[in-house]
Structure formats: structure tokens, C-alpha cells
Image (cartoon, rainbow, N blue to C red):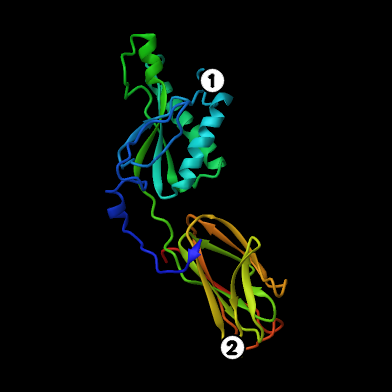
Amino acid sequence: MKKAKSGLILAAAILAMLPFGSTWAGVCQAPTAHSELDLDGCMSGDILILREVHFDTDSAKIKEISFDFLDQVSKELKENPTIKVAVQGHTDSIGAADYNMNLSQNRAESVRYYLVSAGVNPQQLVAQGFGLTEPLADNATSQGRAENRRVELKMVGTLVLSEPQPTNVYISTFHAVPMELVIPAGSQVTWTNYDEISHDISFDGVQGSRIWTKGWNGDTYSLQFDNPGTYSYHCNVHKDVNGRIVVKPAVEEYVTTESPIYPGQTTSSYKGNQTTQRVGS
């Protein structure tokens, strides 16, 4: 969260040509039981083998020993909400080709479901099964078959998130309207004071800025929210002025709240009617 400035929105085509992370000289390396997943340096087309993901035999049920590892994978994906990956399942050559294709698809779906349940944006993930069609080693040996049974993360592109929009909260007769505002990351929020007395906006007990009265002329205070999360605020002067900003990686619709029609409009007459517009419409 930072003072509001106009942010840069990069075209998806440009982003796809650059490293996903901020470390330009990074190397895209597969995680292990002893090293955490770090997507800095990963580019579209890179593949990471998740050797710490295990399943019951002939099953798509993920073994419990894999949970901590998958939690770490989900954490990294949530911290990189613009990265889109394919969860890819592979098998060895034991059994019929159709059976292995279905098994690999179901295992990929299980991993995707686990990551989504852990909070990863489902739009970041696609599940793909390849069965026995893409071996890494010789299926004639037990060691080779073990190497071929695997789950991979393939970097497939950049997820285009909702374009940030300037958004308003109006303070009228000691109430913030709307009390809850859902916005995409990168959006600027502006509080406008329509009361005849001053207010301040404080987050987590830390005072932000006083919004002084100007005889109902609508003094303002703005912040930009870059990181997903829920940010609760209140006024240290008048406790009824409170609300929360919910920041998501992407939203499906933009909600706009009407401003008071005239200065000093009372809460009873100011309804704060809202209009909704679907993203992309």
C-alpha cells in the first residue's frame, strides 16, 4: 500500500517476453525438500519438476507427506499472481495407454484442486495429463519408471489481471459509503469528506491522513493498494467512520458508488446507490 500515483500497466505481450519475477539474473530451478520454490527468473516455457508430490498407488489421492511442500508452492504462486502455469501429470509405461492418460489427468487435477483450495487464483492454473507419452528416462528399468512418474509446473504465460480503476469512498454524516470496497490490485482509492467537520483515515491503528473540512467542498485523501489482502480502517475522531478495502488479484466486475448530490446530504437521504460493470464490457 502506498501513496497514490499513476501506476504502469504493461501489455501482456511484453510481460510474456520478460522474467516473471523481479530478479533479472535469476535461474528457474525446481524446488526440493530442502529448497523453496522461487519463481524469480522463470520465463514462459520453463518447466519445474515437483518431485515432492506423491500419490497413492494407482490413485490420484495426494499423500499427506506432500502437503507441506504443496503449501509452499501455493504460497509462491499467491505472491506472483500474474504467473499462469500448467500443472502437468506424467506416468510410467506400466498399464494401458488410456488408463495412464486418465490417471495423469486426474493427478494433475488433484494438485490443481489442492492449490486452489489453498488460495491460489484458479485462473492461474490449468491441469493437463500426458500419460506415458513424454518419458524422461527408460521405462525398462525401475529407476527410469520412477523418474517418469512425476508432476510438473510449466510456465505458460502471463495472467492479465483486471485493470486498476480509480475508486471512491464518500464520507457523509459520519459514515463511509460503501463500508466495504472490493478492488483489483493496483487500484487507487480516494476518500472524499462531505461532512462539515474533519476526519482521518487510519489503518491498523496507524493514522493515515486527516481529511479536513472545506465547508462541504469535499477535501480528499488517496491511497494506492498494490498487494492483495483486506485492509480495515477507521477514523480516530469519529468511530462510526470505518470500513475495509478488499484487494484481489483480479475482479469480475467494477462497482461504482454515486456521490452525494449536494454538500452535507444526510445519511437518511443519501443512499449511496451503486452501478456494476462487468470487466471487459
Q: Which residue position is annotated with label 1?
A: 56
Asked if residue 84 can be seen in this view, the reply is yes
- Is residue 173 left or right of 102 when viewed as pictured? right
Which is nearer the eye, 209 or 274?
Answer: 209
**Residue 214 numbered mark, or none:** 2
- Residue 174, percent from left and from top: 69, 78
Which is nearer the eye, 67 or 128?
Answer: 67
Could you tell me which secondary element the residue under label 2 belongs to? loop
What is the crowding at mark 2: few (fewer than 14 residues within 10 Å), some, or many (at least 20)? some
Could you tell me which secondary element the residue under label 1 belongs to? loop
- Residue 193, percent from left and from top: 60, 80
Q: Residue at x 49, y 59 (%)?
A: 251
What is the crowding at mark 1: few (fewer than 14 residues within 10 Å), some, or many (at least 20)? few
Asked if residue 96 can be seen in this view, the reply is no
Q: Residue at x 50, y 19 (%)?
A: 58
Name the image quarter holding the C terminus.
bottom left
**Residue 182 placement: quadrant:** bottom right
Residue extending furthest top?
Answer: 141
